[in-house]
Amino acid sequence: MVNTSGSYCSMVRRLILSFIVLLTACSAPAAMSPTATPSPVPTRAPTSTPTTADSTPVVAGYFPDLPRGRTPEGYHYLGRPDAPVTMVIYSDFLCTSCAIHTLDVEPRLIEAFVATGQMRLVYRHLLQLGERSQILAEASECASDFGYFWELRREIYARYNQLYFNTRETVIDLAAGLGIPRDAFTTCLDSHTYQA
């Protein structure tokens, strides 16, 4: 005769333990104490007229006092070109984590390290989410023709969840809202000048 009561009790214990673990995992998170919300970084509207194709781009409103340009490889940078530390950001405009970094973490990094000359940021497109990602990357490059790369980048991330539908039209509106001439921007975007 085999004693099955021990294995039955063991099985019941395992089921109860599994149920408790499952219940704990599916329950609402414990209440957390509120944390201070960082205040938005103020930006200034451009004080000069955006450029045409044959003029020098303006320095627009996203940390306008910081050096900006392109690396020898053609990637956008913000901060002193000779800063001792370079932080390379690989990002997709439709990436949620990338948006959180750009809107919440990056302004603090810029104020603490880039503005003090200790670091420069270099941005590289990392297209992962299809055709809309491509459109937004091209749009940011078209904005750079007018000196608004960093500004449009920030606007895109601030509204990335609105860009899943009508991506082209929405990004054209965002660019126009920054002061980029709508027709010139649309021509650049539609010609796929910066298609990867």
Image: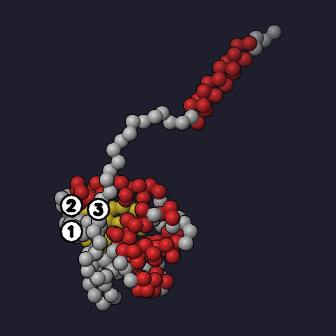
Taking depth in this image into account, of 29 and 124 the one nearest to the observer is: 29
Taking depth in this image into account, of 119 and 73 the one nearest to the observer is: 119
Q: Is residue 86 visible?
A: no
Cα–Cα span, label 1 and label 2: 9 Å
Figure quadrant of residue 142: bottom left
Q: Is residue 149 left or right of residue 127?
A: left
Q: Residue furthest top?
A: 1
Residue at the spot x=31%, y=77% of the render?
147
Q: Is residue 190 left or right of residue 140?
A: right
Taking depth in this image into account, of 52 and 48 the one nearest to the observer is: 48
Q: Residue furthest right?
A: 1
In the picture, which quadrant includes the N terminus?
Answer: top right
Disc 3: CA contacts within 10 A as few (<14), some (14-19) or many (>=20): few
Decide which of tag 1 and tag 3 comes sooner along the chain: 3
Cα–Cα span, label 1 and label 3: 13 Å
Residue at the spot x=38%, y=83% of the render?
181
Decide which of tag 2 and tag 3 comes sooner along the chain: 3
- Residue occupied by mark 1: 65
Picture coordinates of residue 141, whole percent (x, y) = 39, 76
Q: Secondary structure at mark 3?
A: loop
Q: Is residue 51 left or right of residue 95?
A: left
Disc 1: CA contacts within 10 A as few (<14), some (14-19) or many (>=20): few
Picture coordinates of residue 62, whole percent (x, y) = 29, 67
The label nearer to you, 1 versus 2, is 1
Residue at the spot x=49%, y=83% of the render?
190
Amino acid type at mark 2: Ala
Q: Is residue 82 left or right of residue 184?
A: left
Q: Is residue 54 above or below residue 31?
A: below
- Residue 42's label in the rendered image is 3
- Residue 115's label in the rendered image is 2
